[in-house]
Structures are given as structure tokens and as C-alpha cells.
Amino acid sequence: MNLNKGQDLHIRAADQITIVYQILMLGVLLVFASKIHFTLLWFVFHLLIILLLWKLPRFKTNAAVSWFRLWNPLVIIPLNFTELHYLVHTVHPRDFDSLLIQLDKALLGVHPSIWLERILWPPLTEYLQLVYSTFYFLPIILALLLLRKQKMEQVDFFVFIMVFGFYLSYIGYFLVPAIGPRFTLDYLQTKPIQGLWLTPIIRHTLDTLENIQRDAFPSGHTEITSLTMYYAWKYQRKYFYVLAVIGTSLIFSTVYLRYHYVSDVIGGLLLAAFVVLTAKPVYKRLWGEKVYKNV
């Protein structure tokens, strides 16, 4: 597969998923236009993405086009995530944190983030906060490793997996808005999250970049990290052994650092399993039998 030349001017599977999500968001903007801030800006944004990805296979190949064909999710997905701040709570103003707290209590008999206070330790906190911040980079590294070996079919399929996974989790935020235990259970916490040097800087930076989001359920960190670990096992075994430590630590950090409930983590794992089970049939449908056989 040559991603730069396209497949008979066919829109890549990952880009087709991106277009579908933009269309869904256009529908949301139309229905809730009077309640959403910057509606016109976001409306134009989605239209431009749709037009750009639709025309992309027809652009004359050059370095910029080649880069964007492969890596456009690195630009588009964060922008779509930023938009959720303006959409999710407007579309679905009820928070489901109380239900998720009850589920955690029913499953474990305790509030996990409060129970974990007994093992809070600044060096551990520093390590886990650093690991948590690698979330976006872990799948990029896997894609780069595959690209380095010129495994273009696997690169394309893995990028599709990531796009599919991210947008499913975003839809999950609309269905089950939740803000997370660091806000809802803070009145029960008796010990602060305290690292060594970088923890407060990283937490402040992430809070600034993400704004206030209803993005607890399902845990996107858990879903995307689990998918990266699964496909590293399939395609790049040495990298999997690195992820076995970092990825597992990252998933644990989501609860330890009070970003997520255990229910969110379970939801992320189930969503990752759903992506694995459905990805090949969806990819085959969107991209074709010939490529499908090579992933």
C-alpha cells in the first residue's frame, strides 16, 4: 500500500471514520445551536475537515500532503476533544458520577481513590504522573516503529484503530457524562496528591490543555493504552514488553491520581475489546479486501 498515492482515490478508512464523526457533530451543533458557544466556529471547522479529507486523495503528492495523509489524526483528534468542553454538558447536562461511585462501591466495597491514600508516596506519584502524561505518545511510537520497518498496511490499520477508538470514547462521553473522583470525592480525601518536582507542573498543564471535561467514562487512557499494548503484541513484540510496564502503570495511575473511577477503567477495557472485535470487519468494509488480508 502506498499511502501517498491513495488507493484509486479512495478515502482512507481512518479518514472515513473521522468524516462520520464530524457529520455527527454537525448534527449536534444544528440541534443545540442556541445553547452552544462558538457554534459557527465549530460548524465551519467540521465542514472544513470533511472537505479536506474528502479532497485529500486528489491532492498532488508532496511532503506536506504525504505527512497529512498519514498523521492528520494528530491534528484533528485533539481539536475534536477540545470541542467536547462546549458540547457534552450542553447536550447531556446530567452528570453520572453518583452512579459510577455507587458501582465502584458495589464492586469493591470502598471508594478506590480514597482507599489508595494508604499507599500514596511522592516518588510513586511522580512516576505515575509522568507515565500518565505519555498517553498520547505511546501509540505514536508504535506507529513510528512500524513505519520505520515499512509495514505500511499495519501502519494504516493501526492509525484506523486509534481513530476508531478515540471517537468511540468521545461518543461515550456524550452518553455518560462524568467529571471524575478528583472533583466529586475531594471532600472525602484526607491526603493530597503530592509528587516530587514535576507532578504539580504536569497536572496544571494537563488541566489547562483539557479544560473542564466530562470525559471520565469510559477511560480513554485505558482504552487507547490497552489497544496500543494489544497491537504492539501483534506487530512489535519488543515494544510490547516496554508497554507491559508503562502501559500497566498508566492504567493504574488513572485511579491512583484520581482522574478516573474503577468503573471508568472497566468501561475503557470493554471498549478496547469492542474495537478489537469489530475493527477488521469495519476496516474491510471501508478500505477493501486486498488490504484487509494484510493486517
Image (cartoon, rainbow, N blue to C red):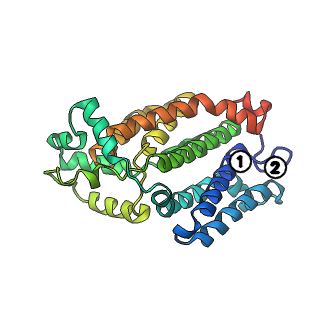
Residue pictured at 37% horizontal, 36% vertical: 248
Which circle, 2 or 1, is nearer the viewer? 1
Residue reaching furthest to the right: 8
Q: Secondary structure at mark 1?
A: helix
Binning the other alpha carbons within 10 Å of mark 1 as few (below 14), some (14 to 19) or many (20 upward) gives many
> Quick one: 22 or 295, which is closer to the camera?
22
The image shows residue 26 at horizontal and vertical percentages of: 65, 59
> Quick one: 47 or 276, which is closer to the camera?
47
Residue pictured at 59% horizontal, 28% vertical: 277
The image shows residue 40 at horizontal and vertical percentages of: 62, 72
Label disc, if present, on residue 16 of the rendered structure: 1
> Quick one: 147 or 68, which is closer to the camera?
68
The image shows residue 207 at horizontal and vertical percentages of: 36, 62
Label disc, if present, on residue 5 of the rendered structure: 2
Residue pictured at 43% horizontal, 61% vertical: 210
The image shows residue 61 at horizontal and vertical percentages of: 80, 58
**Image check: 280 left or right of 78?**
right
Q: Quadrant of the N terminus?
A: top right
